[in-house]
Amino acid sequence: MNIPWPGGANRERRERREEDLNAELRAHLRMAEADRVGRGESPEAAAAGARREFGNLGEVKHVTRAMWSGMWLDRLTQDLRFGFRMLRRSPGFSILAILCLTLGIGANAAVYSWIEGILLRPYPKVVQQDRLVVVAGTIRGTPGADELSWPDFLDLERNSTLFESFAADKITGTTLSIGDRAERTSGQIVSANYFDAIGVRPFLGRGFEPAEETGRNAHPVTVISYKMWHDRFQSDPQILGKTQRLNGLPHTIIGVAPEGFNGTFVGYAMQFWVPASMQETFDQSGYKLEDRGARWVESFARLKPGVTREQAQVELAAVARRLEAAYPETNKGRGIELYPLWKSPFNNAGALFPTLRIALVVAFFVLLIACANVSNLLLVRAFARQHEMTVRLAVGSGRGRLVRQLVTEGLILSAVAAVGGLVVAHWCRNLLVLVIPPRGVAMNLPAATDWRVLVIAAGVCLLTTLLFGLVPAFPASKINLASAIKAETGGVVGGSGRSRIRSALVLVQVSLSFVLVVGAGLLIKSLQGMRTASPGFSTENVLITALDLNSAGYDPQRKRVFQDELMNRVHAIAGVQSAAYARIAPFSYRTYSSAPIVIEGYQAGADEQPAADYDEVSPDFFATVGIPLVSGRDFARNDDETAPPVAIINEAMATQYWPGLNPLGRFVQVKGRRVEVVGVARMSKYGALTERSKAFFYVPLRQNFAGVVVLHLRTSLARGPMGLALAREIHALDPGLAPAELVTMREQVDRKSAAQTVALSLVGIFGGLALVLAGIGLYGVMSYAVSQSKRELGLRMALGARASDLLRLVMKHGLTLTAGGVVLGAAAALGLTRLMGDLLYKVSPRDPVAFAAAFAVMAAASLVACFIPAWRASRTDPAGVLRQ
Amino acid sequence: MHAEHAMAKKDSPVSRIELLQGTLDFIVLQTLRWGPRHGYGIAQMIRAGSRDVLQVDTGSLYPALHRLERQGAIAAGWEVSENNQRVRVYRLTAAGRKQLAAERSKWAQLADAIAGIMVPPTETQA
């Protein structure tokens, strides 16, 4: 055992002391010898006599040493050595205990590291993230957060005093061809101070300069990620000054971000950064740097040390009110709200929060169950060691010392388990990536377990140790010397106080497992519900793929021609029933266009600002994705730039703004244009199955042109042949253009249930673990009870009880325990399942089916756990037992 | 190792320390009242002083000396004895004297009490 000594000086002092003690005792012996010789003994006899009288030299040294200062370290070493020996003596017990704890601690460390990596410090390499806050806009009377306009962002920055810096970022993307495959790559449009504000220094070159954020498309410069530098440019040391085409425009590479820096967006690893001046190049909806009404900036700010979020909120709210007064036409009803990073409305952190919260609770349950198991094991051992304890008390060991010894043993167990737990946690952090569906959220968890995670895991260990180290210590230190002398006799199955503690522990285990099983059941039902729920469009026989003509560098005319020609060719592919473009595919991670609308003939409330999301789609879109038109007509090819603007609205929009009226032929004003309603589409889900019904409309792509679109195909062809056919047609039009991957609509919808899938995987894995641990606990208690009451069982048998009676007796005891646990668990579950909130889809948190299923699972598990001990009890050999 | 000895050997030094603790401290302080002395000397003196009744074993004596030293009741230093031995000599400190005075009165009371129990007063009840 290697105990670190407090310091070198201390060690020297200790060595000197040791020498002094040797000299002192040697002198004692010599004087005793001399006295004996003086009394006439022979030198040999004197030496032997002195030694005999002196006693065990090593022992004397040992007990004397124990009086020195710093001796707690000595005692600790001694306790540790002894503890290790005791644990080695019963390897089965030790391995089982360590295994239980390893799983418990590992599960917790893993969850903490996820929370750390996703919620608390989500951005690797960014300094002092605890002082970062997300700055979001609010709309009076509308829940949720909005983005900021660039002029508003600048005004907030200029007029506040409590912040060290403001930084703006906006996720964007471009298509890069990698080999002959086009791949969407994420990047961020950022304010010039971005890298300074987050404390990230480019690994090569520089960040942006203040001048580079001004001027319309004036500074095509970019900082690329380390990964892009490594993969795409083969770590070229001469990279600075070279160009990379981004969205069709060559950008000069001025820097390379450090390795491991992923940008400031949970869920995607950013590959490039461009200054705000390049906004228009990456945003198809126009130039926005001077438009106070165009809200697109996602910003965050660093609070000055000691400033609270509440103080900062007050200051920014005042600035927002001044802006509202100064620019009523754009800022009416607009406010500011600060969020901590983990509640950011702008990325996936917020979406993962409920899942992580559940994971935390679940992991804690697993730890509790593991602790209960280890406590049980320790209790059994404490019982077996009662004799040892009695002897130690009899020879004068203090009770405190006994308690300390037991705690030390617990400490050893949990320390070993903590090391194992960290290994488990390390594997688990990657597990989270595995359970997230491939095309879902890209997690960028930091590679190394953070020291804070280590501290928390160590804290959990310490708590655990106290929990189960002391549980057996209490009965042990209360050993009654007199009663302990009496032989240990087994009582009636489940009688004594100690076995009541153990039964209570099993009760807790069963109830906690029950809660987890109920949770898993609810999630399974939710997921089933989501799998079978109709999003309002077809999920079968529809394939989608992105087509990015902006990155290809085409001029607007060529983009239109290309889109048309490709559409003609696609229609000609055998097996394609229909095809259409849309700017945004349903259930995409990209955001729909959104605009304030004015409904002609509809009087909006005083504070109401009607607004709706919309999508730009080509003719045949509704037929291709399978959304029926309730009335009116589809867009036609001639609904183009030259024709009057038209729109198709959804049913919710029709009933909201034209209740009881026929909306066809009526007008909506969108972005200053009068648009005629020509059709009404059936309701469908647009972004997620869990979203509420909302007003939504469609406009013709031709009247609202976009160079980056998604091609929707309704086809009986499988993905493989369809992909080949599509690639052939694209290459026929432009050999340099790489097609992107085909995605089925089913996958597109499923990836939006990622949160539920992740939650189910976690609750499923941990719930299964908990069930096994609880089963082991129940089995342990029952086996022990049976082995302790062998005499009683033998006696009963001798008195005429049949094997089946004994089986029933033991089973009854075990199942009573289970029943108690299930009742407790059901009560707890009724309160706790509400925590799952949004993760539940069309399932009540008190769903009787889930509860019934959990009950059945627990009953089955406990039947298995009790049967073996019960069967063993029924095989008791009365003659053998009574003879013992 | 040590803990096992403690379990196995009924008469191990550990048990005696615990039994003799308060008493031994008092005896040691009392012995040092007549001047500085080394460990062996203290043991001899206790033995002689108690007419061979009290035999302090080294496993109790040295821990007691080191404990008292740590508590500040006695101080230790190295000296050369009459027969040219380097010996560690203990002497009473001011704190030790105070402690001794307190213990003496406590012991006197205790001795009185025990004597009272040993020699029961004659029955006065009628």
Image: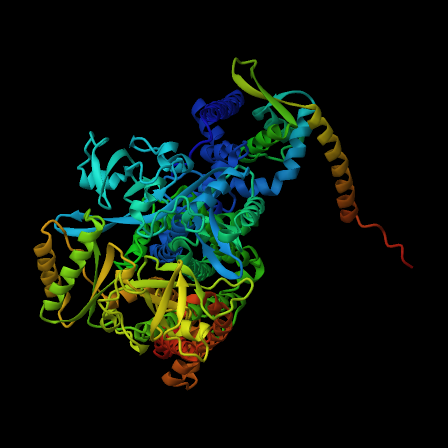
Residue A843, x across and y down, in percent: 41, 75
Residue A714 appears in the figure: no
How many marks are shown on the rendered structure?
A: 0
Depth check: give the residue in front, A137 or A217: A217
Q: Is residue A816 above or below residue A325?
A: below
Residue A350, x across and y down, in percent: 42, 56
Quarter where residue A520 is shown: bottom left
Q: Which quadrant of the rendered structure holds the C terminus of chain A? A: bottom left
Residue A432, x across and y down, in percent: 32, 56
Q: Is residue A407 above or below residue A251?
A: below
Quarter where residue A644 is shown: bottom left
| Residue found at the far right of this picture | B126
Residue A59, x across and y down, in percent: 47, 36
Depth check: give the residue in front, A731 or A38: A731
Depth check: give the residue in front, A825 or A301: A301
Q: Is residue A772 left or right of residue A546?
A: right
Residue at image point 41% right, 63% down = A669
Residue B86 appears in the figure: yes
Q: Is residue A566 above or below residue A448?
A: below
